[in-house]
Amino acid sequence: MAATAPLPSPPTRPSALRLLAEQSFSRAAGAPLLAGNGVDLLIDARAAFDAWLAAIRGAERSILFENYIFRDDALGREFVAALAERAAAGVRVCVVRDWLGCLGQSGPRLWAPLVAAGGEVRAYNPPRLASPFGWLSRDHRKLLVIDHAIGFVGGICVSGTWLGDAARGIEPWRDTAVAVRGPAVLELAHAFAEVWSQLGEPLPPDDAPAAALPSGQVDLRVVATVPNTAGLYRLDQLIAGMARRNLWLTDAYFVGVAPYVQALIAAARDGVDVRLLVPGSSDIPAVGSLSRAGYRPLLEAGIRVFEWNGSMLHAKTAVADGRWARVGSSNLNLASWIGNCEIDLAIEDDAFARRMEAQYEQDLARSTEIVLKMPKRRRASAERAPRNARAQGGSSGRAAAGALRLANSIGAAITNRRVLGPAECAPLLVAGISLLVAAVLALAWPRLVAWPLAVLAAWIGIALVARYVDLRRRAPPRREDASGPPA
């Protein structure tokens, strides 16, 4: 009797735990897991700028470019010239710049060659009479999509500041970006199109292909957040709660909001190797001082904190358990998590996570660890970057981070909900004196306070009425049924 051939093994199915984790990540981030992508790590601005310019100059159909800062310098003009050349050749070129991010950095003169060549530039959220506080929401993304075939995401703005200044002894900024190919690129293009449509006519529906071919073996999620969605915040909380071996974070403007700090502390006390790498010399020195006020609870819980020794650390990355990594534009503060348009890639791939871990260890070699029993809080000046390294630039997170840290310190002092650290002395003094001065002015010259408040109240009232009229005008007419009253 002939031997029976063995039956083929059934395909390996993901475990129930793995499926549950994938479902949790997808629901928290509001982004599905996309397979079949290729991802390249771009370290620092020079590598990113070279890759961006090469992709732009090779574009054949479309260029979608969204960035917080476009600076009118040699680098910015080089980018505009490349974009204008492609627009003149018939390529659709669409640029979204943030109004506040570009304020004082660039103006219409920078974009004139591109507009003349047929490209289109739109500003995100300029001040409007109908929205008194709308300017608080910013487009903080750093996104470039070429021909729906390759996309770039990271923390780098279009500014020569990121390249440093060798003549003045200023090193390039430390930052991270990625290039991605595969199905995820369509999600990046869709994220751009969502913002573009808020600012004017939407992109034509036939501008994007229906599907993208696989281009690698990397699984990832495109986490494209808009104000008040907090998808990345939920994902960061989930990662902090699920990490088992290590969680290494790099952030430019870290502001430890209580729920996230508690998640990191719980992980560290559970034996997870939690590390935080932040700038030692911030482009806004006051923010660095305010951020240090939150070190103590982290250090007391066993979280290791490091400060970068170079000119500016602007990267926003995370890596956990040698399997999961995140690269993008979001800082670990409420401005990024809740207030801004941001875009990040959450990557689930062993090889990419190992590269991120190796880079993190290289960065720590150029950093100084902060410890509680250090004789002097401030490192020696030789270990610090030179004062002239504090070049202008940066992102919206810095101002929001400082405001949130100040509010956190004042709230803690008033409610006595936690022990305040020595680094919080200066913010409390500034806030206290400011409030006392305001009180004296209000008592001595009530009109000096009443008139600005009245103007603000009138502005908000007019804005609300105008919004009501606009909504009523756009509302469809009510239909009347046979019985008479409107349905």
Image (spheres, helix red, strand yellow):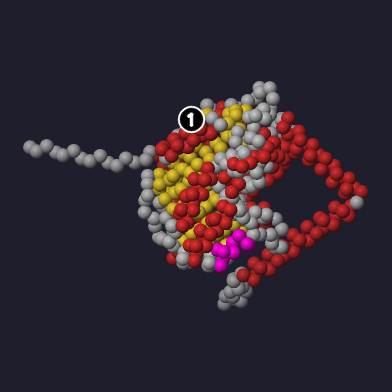
Q: Residue at x 84, y 46 (%)?
A: 438
Camera-nearest residue between 300 and 112: 112
Q: Residue at x 82, y 43 (%)?
A: 435
Q: Position of residue 374 (x, y in %)?
A: 66, 23
Quick check: 228 left or right of 152? right
Quick check: 124 left or right of 426? left
- Asked if residue 115 lies in the magenta stretch, the reply is yes
**Range of residues picked out in magenta:** 108-116
Q: Position of residue 427 (x, y in %)?
A: 75, 38
Camera-nearest residue between 291 and 360: 360
Camera-nearest residue between 372 and 170: 170
Camera-nearest residue between 149 and 392: 392
User: Within the image, what quadrant is residue 420 found in?
Assistant: top right
Q: Position of residue 85 (x, y in %)?
A: 50, 62
Q: Amino acid at mark 1?
A: Arg
User: Within the image, what quadrant is residue 211 found in?
Assistant: bottom left
User: Within the image, what quadrant is residue 368 found in?
Assistant: top right
Q: Dividing the image into 4 quarters, which one contains the N terminus? A: top left
Q: Secondary structure at mark 1?
A: loop
- Asked if residue 275 lies in the magenta stretch, the reply is no
Q: Which residue is mark 1?
A: 245
Q: Dividing the image into 4 quarters, which one contains the C terminus? A: bottom right
Q: Is residue 342 above or below residue 306?
A: below
Q: Residue at x 58, y 74 (%)?
A: 479
Most common secondary structure along the magenta stretch: helix
Residue 371 visible? The answer is yes
Quick check: 368 left or right of 446? left
Q: Is residue 55 above or below residue 350?
A: below
